[in-house]
Image: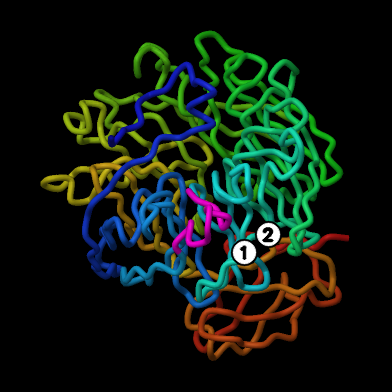
């Protein structure tokens, strides 16, 4: 039976550990997006091609295409897929999960993939794997060759964790880091490190009866070399923000819902570190409008310093009928213009649709907290633009935004062009002198120079979308610049040179 996600407050742990799944029977369409257009539906999923991209966003590959996962659909077991989509909207399934006996390759890849520095993609499945079906960590090539790196609950009592509930992040040491929703010493989730060879180390065990609490979300690698993240549940049972070192020392920086009526928000999602060094994120509930959204508040956008000082920038449902959106359930991104972009799961201009709660929005918000709604879903007849954007959006190196929706009985991939200029992106975003760096972009074939904050570097053009280089001697923290005939492309974020 199809389900839709409602405002959830209080959040129940069984919801967090077993997210609902949509059943989608639809067709695939391909419609190009160009600079003269704003919003465009690029593809609509069908069962065999996958469905329900769920909370999985997209990531740009070294070939200029985008890659993601669907938690459902695909092969005979409907266990999910990894797919590729071109900027013009042509979808190709590159892997069907549960292709191996007893789903030893995993099932339900809910959280998308990340691009590794070797050009392959890495991700997690929330179930399947070894005999206990606790989920997996996998590596997959752009052509679809998958290798299972680890199956969770391989150890007695699942002390290695089970059900990885978030995506991965690659550290400066080339290893990957992530979280599980269950398992560990206290059966309340873990933070882990895994090598590219599949050797897993548990760095931290969460504890529901302790001050750190449980239900961790995705991690982000900060410029100081540590990781930051959130838990959905915390000291006040409304979530926390924490810092953890690569060695496993965890510090809780902030507990949400410490203000009257949860004016500071509750149930935080993922976070992103901005150019100014602070972190920005959303909460799905709470905020100034505590009487709305079933009396739970409709969520917030917040800024928090690395020391834990929080400022609420915006409370949703500040406009009549929540036309500004409600219940943001995905992390933000900082775009090339310095502003933040995100989605709300409900609310928007289509207030009469989607069970009367609105169908979701795409929004832009400045670092000072000025919010602009860029698109309200279900704004076209029969919701041809879909609804319920559950996942974060991404900005491609051509300046346009891309994302996924889950609802409306379909599930889709969309593009949104707002006129922002092209840029280049480095992987990683920090490294020591001599460290190898991958640069992603568009139309890079005729590049004549690469520099790190003004210091020239040697480089090799691999393709129109990829340059390989290394951090040159004398480089300091600053923007990467790629020189092309008639123009120079800057990186979207400063590259941090590690001493």
- Give the residue number, with chain letter if any, for mark 2: 149
Image position, residue 380 (x, y; %): 15, 48
- Which tag is nearer the camera, tag 1 or tag 2? 2
In the foreground, 405 or 460:
405
Bounds of the magenta segment: 96-108
Main SS of residues in magenta: loop
Which circle marks residue 139 in the picture? 1
Image position, residue 290 (x, y; %): 42, 14
The figure's colour scheme reads: rainbow
Tell me what residue is drawn at x 63 percent, y 27 percent.
310
In the foreground, 43 or 473:
43
Q: Which residue lies furthest to the top in this view?
A: 260
Q: Which residue lies furthest to the left in this view?
A: 381
The answer to whether residue 421 is seen in the rendering is: no
Tell me what residue is drawn at x 66 percent, y 53 percent.
169
In the foreground, 71 or 114:
71
The local secondary structure at tag 2 comes to strand
> Please, is residue 72 above or below residue 240 in the view?
below
Image position, residue 85 (x, y; %): 38, 68
The quadrant where residue 358 appears: top left
The answer to if 103 sits in the magenta stretch is: yes
The image quadrant where one finds the N terminus is top left
Tell me what residue is drawn at x 41 percent, y 53 percent.
70
Q: Is there CB contact under 8 Å for labels 1 and 2?
A: yes
Q: Is residue 207 left or right of residue 398?
A: right
């Amino acid at each position: 039976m199809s389900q839709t996600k409602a405002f959830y407050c209080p959040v129940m742990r069984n919801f967090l550990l077993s997210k609902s799944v949509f059943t989608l029977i639809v067709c695939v369409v391909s419609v190009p997006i160009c600079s003269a257009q704003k919003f465009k539906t690029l593809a609509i999923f069908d069962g065999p091609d996958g469905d329900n991209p769920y909370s999985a966003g997209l990531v740009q590959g070294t070939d200029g295409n985008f890659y993601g996962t669907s938690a459902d659909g695909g092969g005979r077991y409907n266990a999910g897929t990894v797919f590729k989509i071109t900027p013009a909207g042509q979808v190709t399934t590159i892997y069907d999960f549960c292709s191996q006996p007893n789903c030893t390759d995993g099932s339900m890849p809910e959280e998308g993939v990340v691009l590794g520095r070797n050009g392959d993609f890495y991700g997690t499945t929330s179930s399947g794997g070894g005999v206990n079906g606790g989920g997996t960590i996998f590596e997959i090539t752009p052509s679809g060759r998958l290798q299972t790196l680890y199956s969770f609950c391989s150890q007695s009592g699942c002390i290695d964790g089970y059900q990885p509930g978030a995506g991965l992040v690659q550290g400066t040491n080339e290893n990957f880091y992530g979280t599980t929703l269950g398992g560990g010493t206290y059966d309340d989730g873990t933070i882990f490190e895994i090598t590219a060879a599949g050797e897993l180390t548990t760095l931290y065990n969460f504890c529901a009866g302790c001050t750190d609490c449980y239900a961790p979300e995705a991690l982000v690698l900060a410029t100081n070399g540590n990781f930051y993240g959130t838990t959905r549940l915390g000291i006040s049972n409304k979530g926390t923000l924490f810092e953890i070192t690569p060695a496993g020392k965890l510090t809780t920086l902030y507990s949400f819902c410490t203000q009257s009526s949860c004016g500071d928000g509750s149930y935080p999602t993922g976070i992103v570190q901005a150019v100014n060094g602070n972190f920005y994120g959303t909460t799905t509930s709470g905020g100034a409008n505590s009487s709305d959204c079933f009396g739970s508040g409709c969520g917030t956008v917040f800024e928090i310093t690395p020391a834990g000082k929080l400022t609420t920038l915006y409370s949703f449902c500040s406009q009549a009928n929540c036309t500004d959106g409600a219940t943001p359930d995905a992390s933000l991104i900082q775009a090339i213009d310095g502003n933040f972009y995100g989605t709300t799961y409900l609310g928007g201009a289509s207030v009469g649709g989607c069970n009367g709660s609105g169908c979701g929005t795409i929004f832009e918000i400045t670092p000072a907290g000025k919010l602009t709604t860029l698109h309200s879903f279900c704004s076209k007849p029969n919701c041809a633009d879909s609804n319920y954007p559950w996942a974060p959006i991404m900005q491609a190196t051509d300046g346009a935004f891309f994302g996924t929706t889950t609802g409306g009985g379909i599930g889709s991939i969309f593009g949104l062009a707002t006129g922002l200029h092209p840029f280049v992106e480095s992987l990683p975003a920090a490294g020591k002198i001599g460290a190898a760096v991958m640069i992603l972009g568009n139309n890079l074939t005729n590049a004549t120079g690469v520099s790190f904050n003004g210091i020239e570097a040697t480089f090799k053009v691999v393709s129109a979308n990829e340059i390989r280089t290394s951090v040159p001697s004398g480089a300091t923290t600053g923007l990467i610049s790629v020189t092309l005939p008639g123009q120079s492309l800057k990186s979207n974020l400063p590259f941090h040179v590690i001493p």
